[in-house]
């Protein structure tokens, strides 16, 4: 079964500007920004010493607009008209609900409040991985190195590319249990290879080379889990070449696919008197709740890999 999630991660932002010969003005807001709002969204960053905030407000726009448009694309850029606001405050600590409270906090003592009509450029970047112990770039995620993952390697031809597939060879043994990367590095030459052929276990549909597919060696319990079928020697049948009982599998093990996104924001066309630069790398969005979950049943009749 497909289950799609997204996780939002960080990037570094730094913006420097110079207001002529009078003051050297520099923003140092750290790595990330947050959001709130349902029908109208507000992105914001806060800092102390000095106490400052910057916000980007977009009307008639929600977080779902970022994720419901072309949800499976590698990268998506959305341009929106927005309002950029810089504020500084005559107090050391800002309330935690400064921007997301229905009732604005009182006694903020705002010293400077400057706004500008801007263009907000949101870029959603797909950063998928199945966390099976193999870096996505080594699983044929982008074989042509062109940013297009549609031609990614799919060893077992089950419709799930290897970099998202918990079971790359479709043998009902999760890739992570087949020790594909013992040293947790960029070299897979030392991947586990039980039958010592030319194919490591995580890509081998017949791990013991006994002529019976690993997924069909479930003589004890047919539950899409060959690891718990042991006829002798406390060794799973799929690794015991002396056991050749074949019980044809009828289904794949259920798959869970995690989809990770990074959402970056850049602001352009800023026009505030004492700020010389007209663009700002706002950083990457964090703290958003799960927005999209889609499922697809993969409990289906099996077919030989590479068919």
Image (cartoon, helix red, strand yellow):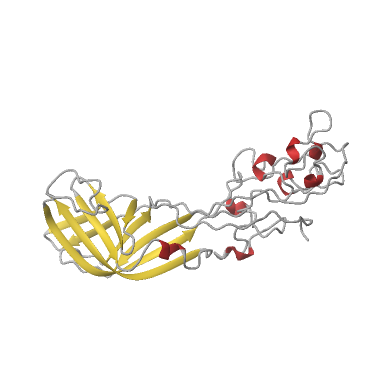
Horizontal and vertical percent for residue 80?
Answer: 34, 70
Which residue is at the front of the view, 36 or 283? 36
**Residue 251 against residue 147 in the figure, above or below:** above
Horizontal arrangement in the rendering, residue 258 relative to residue 106 (left or right): right
- Going by the image, does 32 lie left or right of 175? left
Q: Nearer the viewer, residue 227 or 21?
A: 227
Tag count in the figure? Answer: 0
Left or right relative to 156: residue 98: left
Q: Residue at x 87, y 46 (%)?
A: 211
284 in relation to 230, above or below: below
Q: In the displayed orientation, state which residue is furthest to the top.
A: 233
Q: Residue at x 65, y 54 (%)?
A: 162
Q: Position of residue 70 (x, y in %)?
A: 50, 68
What is the x, y in percent for residue 56? 28, 62
The residue sitting at 31% across, 56% down in the picture is 36
Quarter-of-image position of residue 142: bottom right
In the picture, residue 54 is in which quadrant? bottom left
Q: Looking at the image, which residue is at 15% across and 60% down? A: 113
Q: Judge from the rendering whether residue 238 lies leftward or rightward of residue 263; answer left or right.
A: right
Return the x and y of residue 181 as percentages of the image width and height: 64, 42
Nearest the eye: 58 or 272: 58
On-image quarter of the C terminus: bottom right
């Amino acid at each position: 079964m497909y289950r799609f999630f997204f996780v939002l991660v960080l990037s570094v932002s730094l913006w420097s500007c110079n207001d002529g010969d009078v003051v050297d003005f520099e923003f140092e807001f750290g790595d990330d920004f947050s959001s709130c709002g349902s029908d109208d969204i507000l992105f914001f960053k806060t800092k102390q010493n000095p106490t400052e905030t910057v916000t980007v407000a977009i009307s008639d726009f929600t977080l779902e607009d970022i994720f419901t448009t072309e949800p499976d694309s590698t990268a998506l850029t959305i341009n929106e008209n927005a309002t950029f606001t810089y504020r500084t405050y005559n107090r050391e600590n800002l309330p935690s609900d400064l921007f997301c409270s229905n009732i604005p906090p009182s006694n903020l003592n705002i010293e400077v409040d400057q706004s500008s009509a801007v263009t907000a450029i949101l870029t959603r970047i797909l950063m998928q991985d199945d966390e099976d112990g193999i870096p996505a770039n080594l699983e044929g995620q982008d074989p042509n190195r062109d940013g297009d993952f549609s031609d990614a390697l799919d060893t077992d031809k089950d419709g799930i590319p290897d970099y998202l597939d918990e079971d790359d060879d479709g043998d009902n043994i999760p890739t992570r249990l087949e020790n594909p990367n013992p040293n947790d590095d960029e070299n897979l030459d030392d991947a586990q290879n039980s039958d010592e052929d030319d194919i490591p276990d995580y890509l081998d549909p017949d791990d013991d080379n006994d002529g019976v597919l690993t997924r069909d060696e479930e003589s004890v319990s047919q539950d899409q889990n060959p690891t718990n079928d042991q006829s002798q020697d406390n060794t799973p049948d799929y690794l015991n070449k002396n056991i050749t009982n074949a019980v044809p599998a009828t289904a794949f093990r259920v798959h869970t696919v995690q989809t990770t996104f990074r959402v970056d924001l850049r602001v352009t066309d800023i026009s505030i008197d004492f700020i010389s630069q007209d663009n700002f790398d706002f950083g990457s969005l964090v703290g958003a709740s799960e927005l999209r979950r889609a499922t697809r049943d993969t409990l289906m009749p099996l077919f030989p890999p590479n068919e």
